[in-house]
Amino acid sequence: MEKNNISVRFNWSIGVLLITIVSMMAIAGGAIYIETINWPSVMLWLKYLLRMVFLFTVIGAVGYMPIRLRANDEKISLKRLFNPIEVPLNEVIEITQIPKSYIAGSIRTFGSGGAFGFLGRFKNKRLGKYTMYATDLKKLILIRTGDKTYLFSCARPQEFVEYVEKMLVK
């Protein structure tokens, strides 16, 4: 943490790491299998389509995987390869560390349920609709704005929350 900003990396829990490894093994196995099939010429389009699906699945997951959570006196930023998420501090109503129990009963409406993290849109009775980018469900940070709810995780969640709370008081 520096005086005017904080930058904290994402830690992967053992569960996320195992789900990612198993998912990648399944995708690699599927890719190898489709290469070993003797495809009739009228079905080659399917082989190429499956190649594209496997490729875009991996690129999409890696591209939206959270890398680093940052905050300064203006905004909170979630760094990822594609399209970082930015939340202006003047829109933040609440920021707090929450236990994993807050996401119990959640339904994923779009995104990843563990491969490369818990990424995307979810909903449950307690939080309503929310966007989550977490790689360790034991270190969740809840951020509410007027119209959105975000859940992020990072290596030092309490330190991050304390920094943002100080910036909100200014």
Image: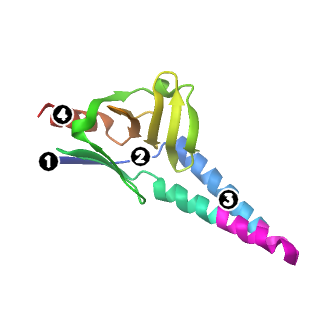
Picture disc at residue 168: 4
Q: Which residue is mark 2?
A: 11
Could you tell me which residue is drawn at 21 percent across and 37 percent down?
90
Task: Check whether the beta carbons of the residues at disc 1 and disc 2 lie within 8 A of each other.
Answer: no
The image's colouring method is rainbow
How far is disc 3 from disc 2 in space, using C-alphas?
24 Å
Q: Secondary structure at mark 1?
A: loop
Answer yes or no: is residue 38 visible. no
* Image height of 110 relative to 126, above or below: below
Residue 4 is labelled as 1
Q: Nearer the viewer, mark 4 or mark 3?
A: 4
- Distance CA(mark 4)–CA(mark 3): 44 Å
Give me the residue at 52% from left, 35% from top.
Answer: 122
Residue 30 colored in magenta in the image: no
- The local secondary structure at tag 3 comes to helix
Q: Position of residue 134 (x, y in %)?
A: 45, 42
Question: Is residue 111 among what the camera can see?
Answer: yes
Q: Which of marks 3 and 4 precedes in the sequence? A: 3
Instruction: Locate residue 81: give its quadrant.
Output: bottom left
* Front one among 116 and 83: 83
- Relative depth, front residue between 24 and 42: 42
Q: Type of residue at label 3?
A: Ile
Q: Is residue 31 above or below residue 75?
A: below
Q: Residue at x 54, y 58 (%)?
A: 60
Residue type, label 2: Asn
Q: Secondary structure at mark 2?
A: loop
Q: Which residue is mark 3?
A: 27
Residue range of the region highlighted in magenta in the rendering: 34-53
